[in-house]
Image (spheres, rainbow, N blue to C red):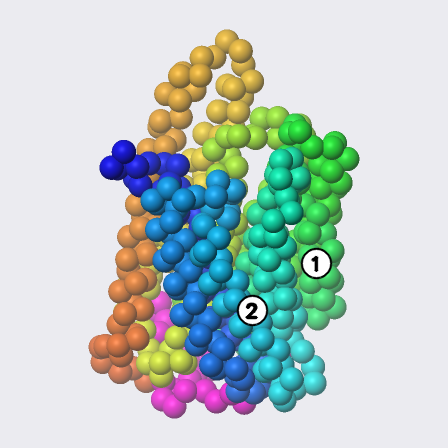
Amino acid sequence: VQHGWLTFGRVRPAHLNTVIYGWISMTGVGVATWLWARLLKTRLRGKGLLLASVGLWNVGMVIGTIGILVGYSRAIEWVEMPLLAFAFIVPAMAMVTAAFILTLRERRVHHLFISVWYTGAAMLWGPFLVIAFLLPIYSGVPESTANWWYAHNILGLWITPIALAAAYYLIPKVIGRPVYSYHLSYLGFWTLALFYNWAGAHHLVGGPVPQWTTTVSIVFSMMMIIPVVVVAVNHHLTVVGHFKKVIYSPTLRFVVFGAMSYTAVSLQGSFQSLRAWQEITHFTQYTIAHSHLGVYAFATMILFGATYYIMPRVMEWEWESPRLVSIHFWTTGLGIGIYITALFIGGVIQGLQLLDPDVAFLQIVEDLKPWFWVRSIGGTLMTIGHFVFAYLLYRIIMRKGAPQTGPTYFRPAPEDMFGTRQTKPAPTIDEQPGL
């Protein structure tokens, strides 16, 4: 009993909620805040609201994480934290939205870059999703349906727009050319807004819900191929002729990795919604791999890249060690690749065995062990990368190391490849974005 906080039923949801509401949401808001002011060419308004939101959000995360570990989980996937935690997090989200609206009113641009559309939409959709699901109006089967509506949309309409906003800004900015097509970017935005909202219920195939609900969800899940392909084509054609810059730029390497993962996880999610495929993969390690492909390989890798771009401009200091940045990329990139590959393969084998009445359940558990060992190798590599990243963040925040006169690249870049940027002074808010 005294070690109950170390059991899987508590550690797993504590980890999940900390990643979603702590790491990705808070880092995403930080990246979005920087992009918002830069692309609107104005200074942030509502700074007091933003500072207050930081405090409230962190208090909510501490309460929520400890609450789950000591046994006060709500047992609702992706919202396991006690309601007291959300009593701090929801007002924090509302404060961020209010600050964004105040800044938008004072913008000094007429044309709104596509990153503004994605970021602004996330700041409206995110708080609405959390508030709508926390209302005490669900019970029984409707609660399960609402749960998957929420769980899918907190990824697709909160995390995804912020990550895509960063990708749409950073890829053109780093390579020095405009987005290939503004029309495609708007098509991708509106089809994401239209189709993703309906996709979550496909996780309830075979459950005690009306069949038309899951059928509609499957249809819209397949329709998500449209925005995914649109975004993939737009990013690819933007980078055409500039792929060699990935060799040099940490930001570009992380963001391109994340953008490619977005294509992979979204297409996989569409086909995973089909009943024939779910019959094999439902309730297996395959779905765990799918979630990590989206939350980590897509969103987290893009946020890493955005951090490598933004922090030198905020701190007026460069990253200390290209070697450590490279270690961070390869340990996290290879780590998540090994992790999801092991669970994809192991999950399919697990699903096929579960359908075979001649295979004992304990035999399935034994057969999964080698894939769990491989997953552990991937997770260990990712953990090493996280410690390296934390060390690099500490060094740049404390302005440690010798000052540098230019950006940090993996290797010396030709003078005409990226242009120049002095570490001091930091770029002004009037710096032309990647338009």
**Residue receiving disc 1:** 193
Q: Secondary structure at mark 1?
A: helix
Q: Which corner quadrant holds the N terminus?
A: top left
Predominant SS of the magenta segment: loop
Instruction: State left or right for residue 394 relative to residue 299.
Output: left
In magenta, the rendered stretch is: 408-435
Mark 2 element type: helix
Decide if residue 59 is on the left or right side of residue 136.
left
* Nearer to the camera, 363 or 244: 363
Nearer-N-terminus badge (2/1): 2
> Does the stretch in magenta take in 412?
yes
- x, y percent for residue 175: 52, 73
Q: Is residue 229 above or below residue 406?
A: above
The amino acid type, in three-letter code, at marker 2 is Ala
**Extreme residue in the top direction:** 358
Res 27 quadrant in image: bottom left
Which residue is rendered at x = 72% and y = 66% of the image? 186
Tag of residue 94: 2
Pointers 2 and 1 in contact (C-beta within 8 Å): no
* Marker count (numbered): 2
Q: Position of residue 3 (x, y in %)?
A: 26, 37
Q: Which residue sits at x=40%, y=80%?
A: 314
Would residue 402 appear left or right of 353 to someone viewing this image? left
**Residue 356 at what x, y percent from top left?**
54, 14
Residue found at x 38% / y 56%: 63
Mark linked to residue 136: none
Structural distance between the alpha carbons of marks 2 and 1: 20 Å
Residue at (33, 33) in percent of width and height = 373
